[in-house]
Structures are given as structure tokens and as C-alpha cells.
Image (cartoon, rainbow, N blue to C red):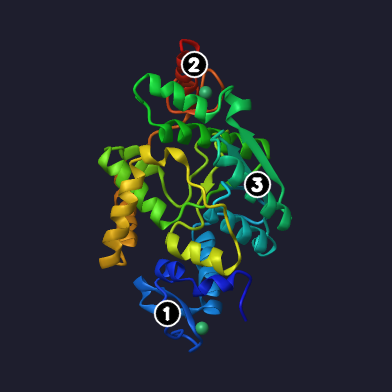
Amino acid sequence: MLARGARYISAAPYQRAVGYTGVKCSLCGERAVVRVAYAGVHLCEKHFSSYFEQRFLETVRLFRMLERGERVAVAVSGGKDSLTLLYLMAKHADRLGVEVAAVLVDEGIRGYREEKARAAEAYAREWGVELFTKAFREEFGFTLDEAVSALMLDGLRYKPCTVCGVFRRYLLNRAALELGADKLATAHNLDDEAQAFLMNAVQANLPSIAREGPRSERVHEKLVPRVKPFYFIPEKEVLTYALLHGIESPQVECPYIVYSLRHPLRRWLNEVAERDPGVKHKIIALKNSLTPFLERGGPFRSCRACGMPSSGEICKACQLRRYVEDLLANR
Ligand SMILES: [Zn+2]
Ligand SMILES: [Zn+2]
């Protein structure tokens, strides 16, 4: 039985992307659609899907990410990873005993965000999940595009992705709080986490390494704990699952990706993984063995300007907001 979207299996780029070799499933002898290189097995569509869903459910259980009766806000960007997470959370909501809502942050990136947001809205409707949107323009008074043009005037002292990341995290947390959510689930996968570790490592950002784990604690009453059910799942597998279940996303890329250190690190890590399929797991294992020795840091205080969680007197979002406002005013 083939699910919606299975027609894409014959596409050569897809075969390269998932490492499909045309051999048989290691479990049942049916045609394999994916090679799970680090586990040394080939899986057919049915066995891959159940393997994937089991890993998702096991991660949620093992790390006690969700408790029965909780409300979980799923952060969706409209990309395949977050749509897949929303799909699985909606599919298993009854089994996990949770109530699911979706939150989306509209940064105001022309030619990119509108397209992705439309996909998120359509899928949320199809899967019966309510979607809540927070926009930079309404919350901060400027779009990311406007902020970036202002940052350029100051020689990009702050990178677009840094500013965007701070604002996005801030608004996702605010949205989750306003929804009364007990947890905020994000679709960060093994690749994202391995890249984040390397980025933090080269920037010697030890508190961030300590803080980024599969789940966070409620260290502040206004900080909704984050959970990452795809923490141990490689990006390739998330994309394969999305493909097999007909979950599609407009092929537009954020124009600011070129400014990010993540971009070259991602390429490099994938190159290394070609030779050593377990390298991303090894990086995460290293990170997790380091974490107990690192100082986690805040945010334990409340921002004097907005009252939201902060590690200093004024939270990063308020600091950056003022910085961008000043640049915009003096333009
Ligand atoms: Zn099989
Ligand atoms: Zn603040």
C-alpha cells in the first residue's frame, strides 16, 4: 500500500536524497524506499513509517516531554520538518492525551514567509488544528526585512539570523503563554542540533550548549518549557517521512541564509556524514556528556521593560528592538 505522495519515490533526486538503493526491506522483503545508513538497514515504506513514528513516540516518552492532559503548542514555520511534527502531534494527540495547537511567527520576509505561512494554514485546517500567528510588524513595529535594511547601515554588527532568532523565540514563547500551553514543541532534528552545537562550539557559547537539550525546564514562570521530539532523528528521515505522507512545502529559501554560519557548517557536516554516517549522533552524544559540566545560565529574572524571562536587566529581544528602532529612526 502506498500513501499519498509515494509517486515521488521514483524521482532520482529523491533517491539520492534518501540513499535509496533499490534493494529489499531488511524486515519484510518488500521494496525498500530508504536506507537507514547508521543502523545498517533498508526499510520499505510501511516499516520506515512505523520505525519513524516509534522513534517520535519513544523520544516523547523517554524524556517525559508531554504529560496527559497538557496543552502543547507546536511551532510551525511552514517547512516540511515543522509540518511533519504538527501532523504527528495531531495524529497521536489522543494516544498521548494532549491537546494540540499550532503557532507561527511571521517575521515579514517578502517572497518567503507568505508562501510558507499559506502551507501551514492549509495543513493546520486539514488536520483540524487551530493556528495562531504572531507578526514582527504588529509586535515590534517593523518587519525583519526593514530591520535588516537598518542593520546594513550599521555594517551588520548583528547578523539577520541572530536578530530573527531572538525575536522568533521571544514571540513563540509569548504565543505559547497566551494560549495557556504547558509545552512548546519545536521540530529541531538531529542535524539542527548537531549544527547548533558546532556553531556554539566555534563561538565558545557554553551556556547555549548547556541549555539546548531535548527538553527544557520551567526556570521562569513565563518561560514555556520547550520539547524537541525529533531531537534524535536525522533531517533526511524527517524529509523522507514527509514525502511518503504527501506533506509538501513551497520550495522557497529564506534570503538571509547566506549570512548564517549554519549554512556552511551544514554542508560540511553532511559531507563528513557521507563517510561516517554516525557522526551527527556522535556529536550529540559528545554534547550530552559535556552538558552536566557546563553552567546553564539564566533566564531567571524578569525583563524590566517587558516582564518576560531574561538573563539580564533587559531581555535580548527588548535590547535588539531598541537597537533596530534607533537605527530606523536615524536613517
Ligand atoms: Zn518492510
Ligand atoms: Zn524584554
The answer to whether the beta carbon of the residue marked 2 is less than 8 Å from any atom of ligand 2 is no
Residues at marks 2 and 1, CA–CA distance in whole angstroms: 54 Å
**Outermost top residue:** 330
Return the x and y of residue 32 as percentages of the image width and height: 47, 81
Question: At 57% from the left edge and 54% from the top edge, which residue is drawn?
Answer: 249
Query: As rendered, which of 82 and 149 lies closer to the eye?
Result: 149
Q: Does residue 277 appear left or right of residue 109 in this picture?
A: left
Would residue 219 be seen by someone viewing this image from the given angle? yes
Would residue 57 be seen by someone viewing this image from the given angle? no
Q: Does residue 66 appear left or right of residue 277 in this picture?
A: right
Among the 4 quarters of the image, the one containing residue 225:
top right
Q: Tell me the crowding category of disc 2: few under 14, some 14 to 19, or many 20 or more residues within 10 angstroms, Cα based.
A: some
Query: As rendered, which of 30 and 206 lies closer to the eye?
Result: 30
Task: Tell me the amino acid under the disc marked 1.
Answer: His
Q: Nearer the viewer, mark 2 or mark 1?
A: 2
In this rendering, the answer to whether 197 lies above or below 221 is below
Query: As rendered, which of 279 and 126 lies closer to the eye?
Result: 126
What element does badge 1 sit on? strand
Name the mark on residue 328: 2
Among the 4 quarters of the image, the one containing residue 103:
top right
- The residue at which mark 3 appears reads as 118
In this rendering, the answer to whether 21 lies above or below 89 is below
Among the 4 quarters of the image, the one containing residue 282:
bottom left
Question: At 51% from the left edge and 30% from the top edge, which residue is drawn?
Answer: 144
Going from N to C along the chain, the mark reached first, 2 or 3, is: 3
In this rendering, the answer to whether 293 lies above or below 95 is above
- The residue at which mark 1 appears reads as 42
Residues at marks 3 and 1, CA–CA distance in whole angstroms: 35 Å
What element does badge 3 sit on? helix
What element does badge 2 sit on? helix
